[in-house]
Amino acid sequence: MTKILLCGANGKMGHAVTRVAEQNESATIVAGYDVLDTSSNGFPVYDDLSKISEKVDVIIDFSHPSLTDGILNFAKMNNIPAVICTTGLSADQLSRIEYESKYIPIFFSANMSLGVNLLMDLVTKAAKVLEENFDIEIIEKHHNQKLDAPSGTALAIADTISEAISYAPDYTYDRHSVRKKRDKREIGIHAVRGGTIVGEHSVIFAGNDEVIEIKHSATSKEVFAVGAVSAAEFLKDKPAGFYNMKSLIK
């Protein structure tokens, strides 16, 4: 049984992880951490990591970037593997995650959906074949409460394409300020915010007289929770190192 400490336990994603864990026979949440609300979810929820006394195998973090450094400190101090799912992290925080993975197992992915990571694999293969004759555009859609744009997943998709093709592309986020034709080396990245859209990512390869589109839509937050719990089970007992969805689905 994988014993989980859930950070951000009382947020929307925390509730989704709780629902998924309740249906999982090999993982359970033994404690939660949330600074804003410490109501019970069927397990104790603390507002201070130092108060946690339960035996924990893995941390799942769906909290806030302002809490990430403290969670990493706690994980390292107690030698607990951590699945970092929080989005909107700074470049310094991403660098620190890689650094701390020298000492503890850390799993990090810009998107915890297994389907999105399969999309990235398919996009990589398509980009290698189509790069010479097709323009590449990425469109991401999310709910109107999402703070960061473009999404971390859209940027991760762009980075995946960049690694696959033979040239260094330019990421273009907005074309209204410059009146000129599209450059062949561009990857256009576009953000849509509206309603309650959980998450949608499309990669368009536009060529002469044909268009190929690879798309993933999430209709509930459970898809990300399933990935997080799967990652926690995967990370338990792993040696120190940096792990991601490629490690899980290969």
Image: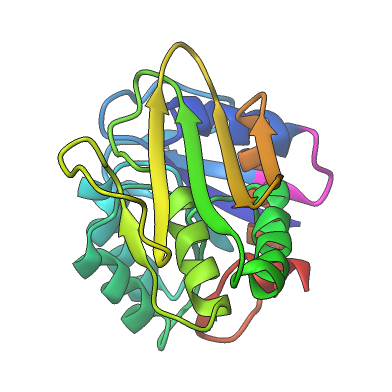
Q: Report whether 148 appears left or right of 17.
A: left
Q: Looking at the magenta stretch, what is its main secondary structure? A: loop
Residue at figure coordinates x 28%, y 32% from the top left: 147
Q: Is residue 236 visible?
A: no
Quarter holding the C terminus is bottom right
Residue 155 at what x, y percent from top left?
41, 56
Residue 188 at what x, y percent from top left?
41, 50
Q: Is residue 209 visible?
A: yes
Residue range (magenta):
23-28
Please tell me whether residue 81 is drawn above or below residue 118 in the rendered image. Answer: below
Badge count? 0
Residue at figure coordinates x 22%, y 35% from the top left: 176
Q: Is residue 25 one of those drawn in magenta?
A: yes
Q: Residue furthest right?
A: 25
Q: Nearer the viewer, residue 217 or 245?
A: 217
Q: Nearer the viewer, residue 32 or 248?
A: 248
Q: Residue furthest left?
A: 177
To which quarter of the image does residue 145 belong? top left
To which quarter of the image does residue 246 belong? bottom right
Quarter holding the N terminus is bottom right
Q: Is residue 216 one of those drawn in magenta?
A: no
Residue 20 at what x, y percent from top left?
71, 35
Q: Report whether 3 appears left or right of 136.
A: right
Residue at figure coordinates x 39%, y 67% from the top left: 75
Residue 173 at what x, y percent from top left?
30, 46
Q: Nearer the viewer, residue 221 or 171?
A: 171
Please tell me whether residue 16 is drawn above or below residue 168 in the rendered image. Answer: above
Image coloring type = rainbow
